[in-house]
Image: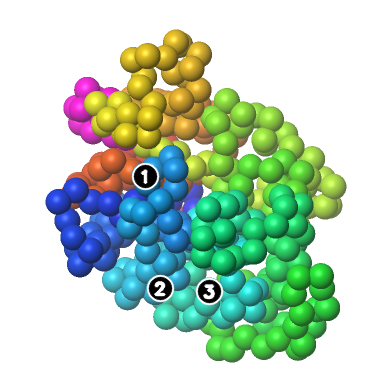
Amino acid sequence: MSIRLGYQIPNFTYPGRHAADIAPTVVAQAREAERAGFDAVLVMDHFYQLPGIGEPDEPMLEAYTLLGALATATERVQLSALVTGNTYRNPTHLAKAVTTLDVVSGGRAVLGIGAGWYELEHRQLGFEFGTFADRFDRLAESLEIVVPMLRGERPTVRGTWYSTESAMNEPRLRDDLPVLVGGSGERKTFRLAARYADHLNIICNATDLPRKLDALAQRCEDEGRDRATLETSYLAFVIVDEDGDAARRMQYDHLRSRGVDLDTLDDDARALATERQFVGTPDDVAEQLQRRVLDRGVDGIILNLVPNGHVPGVVDLAGRTVRPLVGPTPA
């Protein structure tokens, strides 16, 4: 498994389009990403839209149903949630879902998983939220079940949160289905990644990356793992256009829609508001990603294109911009 370049689709609000148009638009983006040389297509595992992207009642598709559809619409790209909210599914159900995705996609599934965090979804939809510590304890216990089931083992667990008895998971195409852990927690998330994962997707402000990578190295040492065996990527909010001014207008308009007016902010506040954004012409975006992310030691980029990813040609432009930075598509 290698994800040096991933395309995340977190936004299903497409101007001028109706509910029936959403799935074809997502499929078109996934196919364009595949043609453009992305290693993976990833979707969010949420039921409501996230505050940084839109309003809670904006369109949001269920992740594994959507990934199954994308499996039939693509041929090469790996497919994953970025990331599965552990609190939304029993771990045996999750193991079955991701293994089924692997079977129907011909061996292209990745289990992306995290602790879960969006309290509004949990409260309104009836999922138990619990404390921060609860959610990470549940994630650790879930991984004790899910990962062995992906490997063909039959775990028996009598845990605080979950119980299994010789849990079976058939059919499987392989015993090395990759595991991706996503998040920013330097102690809990990174420790679980060091213990279980093939890939860690780091979600943080770009200026925090050196500290995050140092913490990851320490967690790997604590777990007795060679840090070089754990691939890393960074989740980047990209707004790219051949016209740099158009890209910057999209950035302003998107932030204004979320209640942030860049014109009213001082330099420090503006820098903080745009810390995870990479905006401008292809050359601008490539320079920013190289300097702010890759030069700090991260292996790859998973990017989204919230304002304009649905526009034909934009995913291809992003792929042509970023692929040279991270190396050729893995064999």
What are the residue bounds of the magenta stretch? 239-248
Q: Is residue 46 above or below residue 227?
A: below
**Can you say which quadrant of the picture contains the C terminus?**
bottom left
Which amino acid lies under the numbered mark 1 shown in the image of this protein? Gly
- Front one among 122 and 266: 122
> Relative to residue 130, is residue 324 drawn left or right?
left
Residue farthest to the top? 266
Q: Which residue is mark 3?
A: 98
Q: Which residue is mark 1?
A: 54
Please indicate, yes or no, whether residue 327 appears anywhere in the rendered image.
Answer: no
Q: Residues within 10 Å of mark 3 (few under 14, many from 20)?
A: many
Which amino acid lies under the numbered mark 3 shown in the image of this protein? Val
Q: Which residue is mark 2?
A: 65
- The colour scheme used to paint the residues is rainbow
- Front one among 197 and 87: 87
Residue at image point 65% right, 58% down: 129
**Comes first in the chain, label 3 or label 2:** 2
Residue at image point 70% right, 57% down: 130
Residue farthest to the front? 124
- Front one among 77 and 135: 135
Q: Secondary structure at mark 3?
A: helix
Residue 96 pos. (x, y %): 57, 80
The image quarter containing residue 181 is bottom right
Residue 296 pos. (x, y %): 58, 29
Q: Secondary structure at mark 2?
A: helix
The image quarter containing residue 147 is bottom right
Q: Is residue 300 above or below residue 36?
A: above
In front: mark 3 or mark 2? 2
In front: mark 2 or mark 1? 1
Marks 1 and 3 sit apart, C-alpha to C-alpha, by 28 Å
Q: Secondary structure at mark 1?
A: loop
